[in-house]
Image (tube, helix red, strand yellow):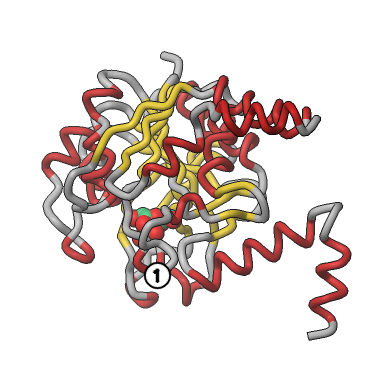
Amino acid sequence: MKVRKAVLPVAGWGTRFLPATKSMPKEMFPLIDKPIVQFIVEELLSVGIDNIIFVTGRHKRAIEDHFDFNPDLENHLQQAGKENLLEDLKNLSALINPIYVRQKTQKGLGHAVSVAETVVGNEPFVVALGDVVLEKPEENMKKLLGIFEEFKGSVIALTEVPPDQVSKYGVAKVKKLKGDVLIVEDLVEKPKPEEAPSNLAIVGRYLFTPSIFPCISETTPGKGGEIQLTDAIRLLLREEKVYAFKIEGKAYDTGNPLDYLKTLISFALRREDIGRDLREFIKTL
Ligand code: G1P
């Protein structure tokens, strides 16, 4: 069955970035001139997934506006002769079919995904988190879909992190299956380094069969008192095989101020228009 839908949880408070996130969604923070959430949407569009279900909340209006047409701005760009900018803006809004559902109370990532159940229905779907932006988005999304097509089960994307960083992520215990495809044996959400089964962290790209939904309903509050998606996947493991793979390229974290800044600088240094000047400036510091 073709994967047509993706769920993007964007309801979080962004407390690690307060006061910047008081009225501004953290997903709208820019990596230079493009908001983080747009990178995730473009990643999904690159593999033909255009039905994008945003699990949103109060104070997230800016995200809805970002993916809508903006006739005033479009007129302005037209009159100013800024055709390229105009094209880019209009294309994005035309390509995406956004669906917004509200997570009325914030009970964790697992709960956020369950809010999309009625819209997803009985079909496989992708979950993509804005906390991480991938260096090779299309390649990794293709891999996620390819493993699903071959093995017909849920798939999670992993990346190696330094052992002292595991407590920031969901961590997987895996075995080799075939080629670079792994099979998941167990998962732990944000373990202490000494309790981690490996240093393979969940990067926030998942493909689920609809069987995940009853598992989320069964999941009791875990780390931080929240309904954790990682715990729901553990329950799924009792019934179905769950596959995994190590992503190609880097995973850039945007979920906390220091990592966001490192990501921002990495992206800026790679830009043709500003990279060289920025590098020179950094040397003078
Ligand atoms: C969430 C997931 C975690 C995953 C991480 C990736 O955590 O719960 O398993 O490794 O995203 O960014 P959060 O960063 O929302 O606390």
Image height check: is 185 above or below 16?
A: above
Q: Which residue lies at the image location 45% right of the left edge and 15% below the top edge?
A: 2
Describe residue 263's horizontal placement relative to residue 40 as left or right: right
Q: In the rendered image, which quarter is residue 242 located in?
A: top left
Query: Residue tagged by mark 1?
Result: 19
Helix, strand or loop at label 1? It is loop
Q: In the rendered image, which quarter is residue 125 located in?
A: top left
> Percent x, y for residue 285?
78, 85
> Percent x, y for residue 72?
58, 30
> Percent x, y for residue 232?
23, 45
> Of the residues shown, which amino acid type is indicated by label 1?
Pro
Relative to the observer, which residue lies in front, 185 or 59? 59
Q: Which residue lies at the image location 43% right of the left edge and 44% below the top edge?
A: 62
Q: Which residue lies at the image location 64% right of the left edge and 62% below the top edge?
A: 264
Describe residue 150's horizontal placement relative to residue 22 as left or right: right
- Determine crowd level at label 1: few under 14, some 14-19, many 20+ residues with C-alpha closer than 10 A: few
Relative to the observer, which residue lies in front, 137 or 199? 137
Residue extending furthest toward the bottom:
285
Residue extending furthest toward the top:
1
